[in-house]
Image (cartoon, grey):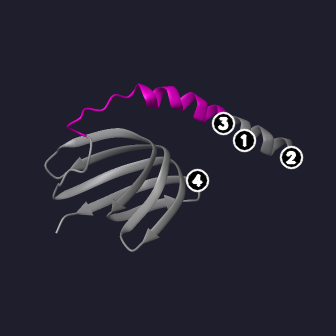
Amino acid sequence: MKRKIIVVTLCVLMIAAMLPVATAVNTDSETDGCHKKLFTKTIIKGFILGPEKQGRTLTFFAVLVYYSSSSLLGETETGVLMMKRVLINGYFIGSIGKFYISGVIYSILP
């Protein structure tokens, strides 16, 4: 029982340590929104709630999610999603649980 309390306390401290770093990230208005790229690989990791997967569509509520995206043309984009509902259309390869996500998303436009 003591071990569970210690683990939960450490997780809460980790989240408390990551929130100020995540809020310091400043995104440009041009990078916000959905960009249409031919082929995109996105590495994603973080804390989520309520994941739902139906075919190629993945939806979840992002508590704190870091992502790094790169396209076939060499364009890269990194950022943080906090307290937002997210809808992803692509092939997800990785691990997804009730409270976390870690993996790679491949998106190919028709």
Q: CA distance from mark 3 to mark 4?
A: 13 Å
Name the residue carrying label 1.
8
The quadrant the C terminus occupies is: bottom left
Name the residue carrying label 2.
1
Name the residue carrying label 3.
12
Whichever of callouts 4 and 2 sits on the residue coming sooner in the sequence is 2
Q: Residue at x 43, y 55 (%)?
A: 103
Count neighbours of disc 4 (C-alpha within 10 A) and say few if under 14, some if 14 to 19, many if 20 or more: some
Image height check: is 11 above or below 34?
above
Whichever of callouts 3 and 2 sits on the residue coming sooner in the sequence is 2
Q: CA distance from mark 2 to mark 1?
A: 11 Å
Whichever of callouts 3 and 4 sits on the residue coming sooner in the sequence is 3
Whichever of callouts 4 and 1 sits on the residue coming sooner in the sequence is 1
Q: Are marks 3 and 1 in contact (CB under 8 Å)?
A: yes
Magenta stretch mostly in which secondary structure?
helix
Count neighbours of disc 2 (C-alpha within 10 A) and say few if under 14, some if 14 to 19, many if 20 or more: few
Q: Residue at x 47, y 57 (%)?
A: 60
- Secondary structure of the residue carrying numbered label 1: helix
46 sits to left or right of 12: left
Query: Is label 3 or label 2 in front?
Result: 3
- Residue furthest bottom in the image: 55
User: Can you tell which mark lies on residue 99?
Assistant: 4
Three-letter amino acid code of the residue under disc 3: Val
Which residue is more in the foreground, 65 or 44? 65
- Residue furthest right in the image: 1
Q: CA distance from mark 4 to mark 2?
A: 21 Å
Q: Residue at x 65, y 31 (%)?
A: 13
Which residues fall within the magenta stretch?
12-31
Three-letter amino acid code of the residue under disc 4: Phe
